Amino acid sequence: MMKKEIFEPFNISDNNFEQCVKCTICTVYCPVLEVNPDYPGPKQSGPDGERLRLKDPGFYDEALKLCLNCKRCEVACPHGVKIGDIIQMARIKHSKKKPKFRDMILANTDIVGSMASTFAPLVNPMVALKPVRRIMDGVLKIDHHRIFPKYAGMRFETWYRRYAAKKQMDFKKHVSYFHGCYVNYNFPQQGKDLIKIMNAAGYGVHLLEKEKCCGVALISNGLIKQATKQARHNVEAFKKSIIDKKMPVISTSSTCIFTIRDEYPHLLGVENNEIRDESELATRFLFRLVDSGKLKLVFKKNYKKRIAYHTPCHMEKLGWSIYSTSLLRMIPGVDFVSLESRCCGIAGTYGFKKENYETSQGVGKPLFDQIDSSDVDFVATDCETCKWQIEMSTSRSVQHPISILAEALDVEATMKLWQNESAEISL
Amino acid sequence: MKFDNIIIGGGLSGLTCGIKLAEQGRKCAIVSSGQSAIHFFSGSFDLLGQVNGEEVSHPIEAIKNLADTHPYQRVGIENIGRLAEEAPQLLNRAGLKFCGKADQNHFVLTPMGVMKPSWLTLDDFTCFDQKHSFPWKKVLILNFSGFLDFHTLFVKDGLKKFEVDSQIKNIAMKAFEAIRKNPSEMRSTNIAKVFDKGDVLDEFVKKANLLSEGFEVIILPSVFGLFNKKVVDELKAKVNKPVVLVPAIPPSVPGIRSQMLLSRRFQELGGTFFMGDNVEEGYFENNRLMDIRTNNHGDIKLEADAFILASGSFYSKGIVATHDKLYEPIFGLDIDGDTDRSQWLDEKFFKDQPYMHFGVKADSNFRALMKGQAIENLYVAGSVLGGANALKEGSGAGISLLTSLHVVEQILK
């Protein structure tokens, strides 16, 4: 085995931008620059601008808020410059703009979510009304084109405690589930689908000791103190599961898991060494089991669908879309269409803001065109905000790979395989 | 995760290996730490332009005069001709069209205004038969107002040697005002994106036709057809004079298009492209590389029967030099290069610099050496090989293409 330590790249200072060779490749792959020339581009905003800002913070340009934080510049960079992180850190350090009331509403997905889901029968029809959307547009500057995701009447956590918690003890192996705000307040079905699959694979699924929103929207809206507090809380909750109970944590949201693994240490300075390796996406967890021969999935014979997979930006950065697509390709009745990996333009709360609407839709257009001409039954993706954007901007609906697997899986046949095996072992 | 073959490096060499293996039905993956040097592609692939300071007219002939340690010699004179025929065919299947032959160099007009010998030139550009003459006498050099990456005066000065009367003019158009606002972002790719959208070419052609009255030919920077090659063809069809495109400062528009076509071809053949990932270490057993661990995939190791290291030279960090050491950063393979730093450089900048010849040591079958032992299933291809000063010789693309095809033949044997 080679030891990697001796081959760390030589860096003259602590600044990662020293690795930049000014090749400009990042600027080719910036989706914002392509549609909005007011944005100075990743090279100028990142490594080039950082040198100036070190001399004098007065060089900070508020136009950096136009960055989507898609990290496609980092994926393209051949020299490992953390361009996206440099830009986000500059915003955190230097931005003088105070978050608006609107930004706080958009960023506090869990507080707003818990209120809205309590009054879901009232809130859902209200925010769907045109006059209400006009007022939100005029007063809050939340673009009226946007359709808010519906809030569920019963939260996922409530459902879990009432109907699922007890059964989880029947299994020998266990994982914790970081469900995230979307599953909890808007779409509990996705969480139910995950439990169905994990149970079929022989794993009991548990909630963390009070998870908090990962904080991705707080970071992008400049609410750093609050984001840091929530990050610390979550890392402790993960530790209890991973270290104390030896239960890895899985999630169904690519952005939540990306934030927890990478943005916590890079942007918030919250150390996550002890939990990072065992915090991952459910599709990666399942793929590993299948790939190493520890799990065999049996699928229904009558499931037949043509599905296109969209790679969310944070999946591109994680490099993990292969896990989701490999699992989908295992379903015999799936006619799989791969879409060219492009940003959909929503970037969480970015696209909800009136001032970003045009950029957001401009960025997404090539993807929308691909989807509309792909003749598929629906689109699969791992990110909830990509789902909203694609459903609003194309003629196709979107499903999470886990929900697709849950529908296509023959649960009993899958369970029988490992039940028989463990019976044999115990004999 | 199991593949038949894994290639480390997604540049010209890695993609050539990947495409050829995938065409033979191999399940392949490419791991690339980011986008590659194809983004700096001038539009021409050189096989051999210079040997011992003498310009080469017939590359295949001239290869015989190279040192025994040169990658071409190691591929073998008996193989070079055949592989040099095969390379453009492979590129062609990916949608890239070239002019040029391996037994006779042609010439291309460089941004410095000189004629440079070359092997394969992308059909965006113009191939010339003569080094010392230019087919036209009255030349218009046309640029975009505010575009700093095309140095028109160099071209004009260069053309003077051919007794050509050339004039420089600029075109300003409303469509480019938005990108001009930010001078650092007025790049060839951003201009190309405006043309790609489809509605400004006609206006541009109209202006170009008007400005070129009284001229025989128009020279333009190569800023056409990033995602859509049709823009180039349409430009040439609609402008009423011959158009000669000249490469601009990178990022290169035809280069990025080529990269996209090649990686698309690889993926359409079933290949998996891991972009933006780094190989952190390899696990060796009995002189075989069993699997590699990457940054993104962590404990989910990537396994293969055979691996190819096509990680590039210094610029792509395929090999690295620090103040006191020279090393191959992924596996710590043996390096063919001087351990004494004082021997790395020649003080005379334009001399044949010794460090340019450094690369990973490989046996006669192009298998990498580690502590003097050949790793049975780890092959080396492209510029990480060393043994040549590609810059001096004009041999970079040729070495990438031909060593890659050769290595794949070793694997398929």
Image: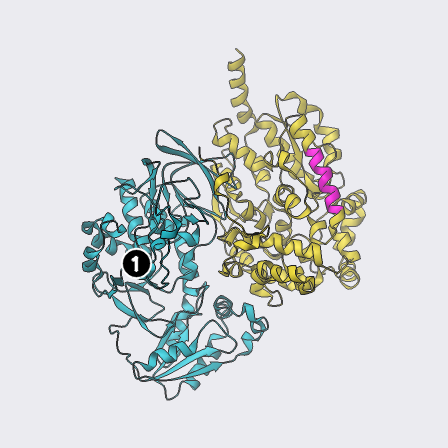
Q: Is residue B250 visible?
A: yes
Question: Left or right of A309: which side holds A207?
Answer: right
Q: Quadrant of the N terminus of chain B?
A: top left
Q: Which residues are magenta?
A: A226-238
Query: Does the image show residue A69?
Result: no
Q: Residue furthest bottom?
A: B214
Type of amino acid under label 1: Ser
Name the image quarter holding residue A380.
top right
Residue of label 1 = B395
In this view of the protein, which residue sits in the foreground, A168 or A226? Answer: A226
Helix, strand or loop status at disc 1: loop
Q: Position of residue A169 (x, y in %)?
A: 67, 22
Q: Is residue A232 magenta?
A: yes
- Chain B drawn in what color? cyan
Residue A143 part of the magenta segment? no
| Image quarter hosting the C terminus of chain B | top left
Whole-percent x and y of residue B172?
A: 52, 80
Q: Nearer the viewer, residue B411 or A201?
A: B411
Q: Percent from the top left, x then y, of residue B149?
A: 47, 71
In-image side of A405 versus B111 (left or right): right
Tag 1 subunit? B
Indicate whether B60 appears above or below A110.
below
Which of the 4 image quarters holds residue B44? bottom left
Q: What residue appears at the point 54 percent right and 30 percent down from the top-left corner? A: A410
Q: Residue at x 78, y 47 (%)?
A: A112
- Label 1 crowd (10 A; few <14 / some 14-19 / many >=20): many
Residue A363 placement, left or right of B398: right
**Above or below: residue A104 compared with residue A64:** above
Main SS class of the magenta portion in the image: helix
Colour for chain A in the figure = yellow
Q: Quadrant of residue B285?
A: top left
The residue drawn where x is 31% and y is 61% is B392
